[in-house]
Image: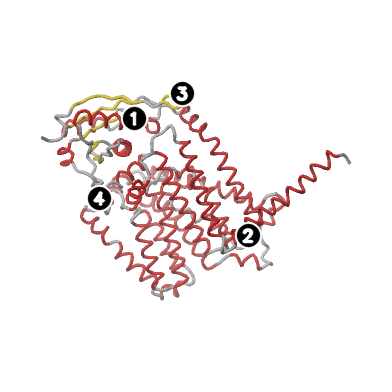
Amino acid sequence: MSTASILPAASRARHRPSLRRLAAWLSERARNPDTSLWLVISFAICHAVLWTFILINLKAAQDVHMDVAEAFAWGQKFQFGYGKHPPLSGWIAGLWFKVFPVRDWATYALAMTTLGIGLVVNWFIALRVVDRRRAFFVVVMLALYPIFNFKGFKYNPDLLQLVTLPLVVLAYLNAFERRTWRSGIWLGLAGALALMTKYWVLTMIGAIGLAALIHPERLAFLRSPAPWVAIATLVVAMIPHLIWLTDVDFVPLTYAGDVYSLSSRAQSAQLVLGYVGHNVALLALPAALAALALAWPPRWVTRAWSDGENLKVYLGVNRRQALNVWIIQAIVAIGPPLGGLAFTVYMKTDWGISLFFLVPLALVAIPSLRVREMALFRIAAIWLVVTLATLVASPSIASLEMAGNPNSAASYGARSQLARELTELWHNKFGSRWSIVAGTTEVGEPMTFYSPDHPAPFTPGEVWSSGLTSLDEAKRLGFIGICDTTDSRLPTCDAWMDANAKDAEKLVMTTQRFFRGHPGPAIDWRIYIAPPAK
């Protein structure tokens, strides 16, 4: 036998044991109570840091998303609500930017920190259902779910639900198991925290309530103090927000009814189908990669499942709690689309962001599924390869996206440039801080974020005002009104400015972004400079 035929075999022999040792080390850290929490926290931090850098590169040619700028604007003034939504996302943004500078990268760091915390909370949920090895497998599956990476770039109430809703599920599983008044208090507080994020969380809270009624052990739970203490705690904790809701005449409900109600059942059905298809496609990626990790090489496909004779495979799953997870996930998967059809609702695909975080756990909690040491190593390796490859490719992806869609005013309009120029213009004219900007949400909130003065946004004609300022205050302090000439609402904007800024100086400003030799759209902005009242 030649030397050439011996060396590769020897190399493979050394390679395989080293991988097995690494897999054994990872498995030991994942299942050891003394090291598993630190492993999960370390993984979540690595995921958050790497994807923060990826998003900085991917979004380098764009300003921050309108939702992010809106959350920042809300955080400039702490209230019990902001017109469209409850206040928690604004409060967190306000606290975050008291520590971090108002820069694009800090918004991506906020989004990824939120998702990193969500990963850790989901690990605690998984521990209520499966063993520690499976729980870590669930966390890595979630990290591969596009909601926790690519699509997690914008911090908003939808993204924040990936912390608050897992906390509700965790509190429920704890209350279902312990059935004490103390566990009921935690469940009630978790529910209040979720409701202070977005009213959409009622879908998950309702699913949890139905799960408690459907579960075979429902009577033991319902006879305990936990559910009733939880309801009482939730109501008491929500009183300040409910008072605000009454004071503003329930404008968030007006907003939801005006924006998301449809008259066409056919259009509603089409949107529901799009919602379902979009979320199934997103879930397919982590499910496929997990299946690859569990069943590779192909000859091991049948070994990924137990024939039921070896009872040890069932010891890794708490079937009582797994049933809760399966019921909850089934309800939130089926309920909203059916509700959208029944009530002719405009179903946004983003509404699914917060509803499917239990899918990886629901799959891994199948009792007959075997999660071996090498499977844990493989899925972690897949995550690392995908993440590092995306990090390397991210600058090129940003350039290719802009080159392929250079005229997208929504994506590549230079609003940050406009904010800086208007701030300088106001200072030169009045020698004071620019206090208020008037314009659509898509224009006003970016001005608040990017201007060093962070003017309060005022949206003309908006019934569900954020409450950050008022028309009377705008006329007293002076304001800059902005109308986007690429917006179909331009005539309405111009008419409002003519009616409410009669003495304003009018001018047109043009901004354009250039990124790595690629020009963005040149946008003309109609500017109305209304001076402070004398």
Q: Label 2: which residue?
A: 28
Q: Quadrant of the N terminus?
A: top right
Give the tally of numbered discs. Answer: 4
- Mark before the other along the chain sequence, 3 or 1: 1
Q: Quadrant of the C terminus?
A: top left
- Give the spatial CA distance, label 1 vs label 4: 33 Å
What residue appears at the point 33 percent right and 67 percent down from the top-left corner?
A: 233
Residue 452, horizontal then vertical, whole percent: 30, 37
From the viewer's perspective, tell me whether residue 377 is left or right of residue 199: right
Amino acid on which the number 3 mark rests in the picture = Gly
- Mark before the other along the chain sequence, 1 or 4: 4
Dot 4: element: helix
- Mark before the other along the chain sequence, 2 or 4: 2
In the rendered structure, are the residues bearing label 3 and label 1 in contact, judged by CB atoms less than 8 Å apart? no
Q: Label 1: which residue?
A: 417
Residue 228, horizontal then vertical, whole percent: 36, 71
- Mark before the other along the chain sequence, 3 or 4: 4
Nearer to me, 432 or 513? 432
Amino acid on which the number 4 mark rests in the picture = Val
Nearer to me, 214 or 465? 465
Near mark 4 (Cα within 10 A), the count class, few <14, some 14-19 or many ≥20, is: many
Nearer to me, 393 or 11? 11
- Mark before the other along the chain sequence, 2 or 1: 2
Amino acid on which the number 2 mark rests in the picture = Glu
Mark 3 or 2, which is nearer the eye?
2
Residue 369, horizontal then vertical, whole percent: 62, 59
Q: Residue furthest right?
A: 1
Q: Label 3: which residue?
A: 517
Q: Is residue 246 above or below residue 401?
A: below
Nearer to me, 432 or 341? 432
- Give the spatial CA distance, label 2 vs label 4: 53 Å
Q: Label 4: which residue?
A: 251
